[in-house]
Image (spheres, helix red, strand yellow):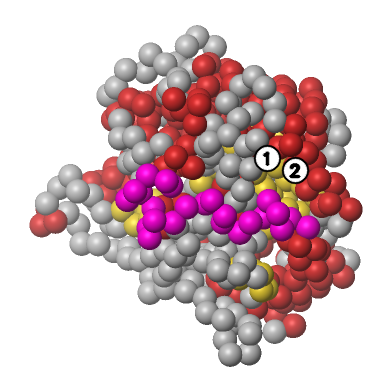
Amino acid sequence: MTDELTQLARRFPTDFIWGSATASYQIEGAWNEDGKGESIWDRFAHTPGKILNGDTGDTACDHFHRWREDVALMRELGLQAYRFSISWPRILPQGRGQVNRAGLDFYERLVDALLEAGIMPFVTLYHWDLPQALQDAGGWPNRDTTEAFVEYTGHVTRLLGDRVRFWATFNEPFCSAWLGYWEGVHAPGHQDLDEMLAAGHHLLLAHGLALPVIRENVKQAQAGIVLNLTPQYPASESEADRLAARERDGQINRWYLDPLSGRGYPQDMVSAYARPMDFVHAGDMEIIARPVDFLGINHYTRAVVRSQAVDESQNLPAAVFPGPEYTDMGWEVYPPGLYDLLIRLQREYDFPSLYITENGAAFADVVSADGSVHDMQRIDYLRRYLAAAADALQAGVPLRGYFVWSFLDNFEWAFGYSKRFGIVHVDFETLVRRPKDSALWYRDLIRIHQTVQSPGDQGLTSPLWR
């Protein structure tokens, strides 16, 4: 195992950043403490029938009270960076106006503790928990919400800008818009195509509006955005399958990548949606396309797309099939998809730096009789995906860091507490933390990497992910 870890570690440059990630609503708990306002996820989770088993994030991992313990554990595992999100309603209970100083104090204490532990804070300003007061005023389909986000960004960056260099405006705007306003499986639970399109636009617009605020308040700021990107592979070479995969790629990937890169919304998708785009005002697309310092990539799996537009008898036989390995989320384990995605971003887009801001796997972990969690499937997943990332680095992709999702088992949105992504096991009854074998594996990888002095060893060939 040590030889294998050494081989893998030597494929990453010496300044590569190793971290882990969480999100505020998924771990903090304390949903109504210290002046925090209600979020759309508080409202959604308390609505009967929305979350599996009736779970809520009221307590979650109780990170709000146990953050010292969690930072100490991060330090023991050797994490170099910690990506976390800030709860907007903890700062501005009504979304705008009166600041809740106790909320700011919480994040200031957390950042100071991270820095004292030698861990770089990597802040996400929005990971889905919009203040309910803003949703009551129209939410993301309402253009005024972009101004509220800029106000919120100003408060947080003025407080922490002297200590936090890395800032992501949004996490996965596709999910906020599509799952929240079209499919309705995420907060606020709406199902309206026009709302979805307007929400997606205003999320991107708020990102662009916030960038100069971040740069004004943060010296040497590294500011960007995080997208969930899933490669779409046609099931055959038929025109029908290729068009279906292209459309799905447009919905998930290009609808956000293209405007951020100054190309506007992809015209094939504008035609496919065939809806009024009157929420796009003059100058919006230039604001959205303001240069970023990095793109964060959340990636877990791929999709194999079969056309529903033609009868099976009229289509070519499927030639591409999902593999035999799946996570507990029902997602295919396919490491080449990460390589293909990174190469595509380098080839088709021009982001100066890339970070894998989420990558990981949910499995049905159990605590063994020896008190350990022997999650070998997760270790294998991480090993193979990291090898794919190393191959992309070797091909010239400007990949700067990797954040495993997630640090803790947590509230997994509509799935409640039924899915465990963490490298640290959490007993949701006692809230006891227990590093899994994957956490120890990741710790050893980081330690070995820190001893590597020759980045030139990246040229080693690795078959581990194939």
65 is within the stretch colored magenta: yes
Q: Position of residue 427 (x, y in %)?
A: 58, 70
Q: Which mark is residue 34?
A: 1
Q: Local crowd at mark 2 within 10 Å, few (<14), some, or many (≥20)?
A: some
Q: Is residue 80 above or below residue 173?
A: below
Q: Which residue is mark 2?
A: 106
Residue type pointed to by label 1: Asp
Of residue 137 and residue 266, the one placed in the foreground of this image is 137
51 is within the stretch colored magenta: yes
Does residue 295 appear anywhere in the picture? no
Of residue 118 and residue 267, the one placed in the foreground of this image is 118
Does residue 443 appear anywhere in the picture? yes
Looking at the image, tell me whether mark 1 or mark 2 is earlier in sequence order.
1
Q: Local crowd at mark 1 within 10 Å, few (<14), some, or many (≥20)?
A: few
Q: Which mark is residue 100?
A: none
Q: Which residues are magenta?
A: 45-68
Residue type pointed to by label 2: Phe
Q: Position of residue 41 (x, y in %)?
A: 48, 42
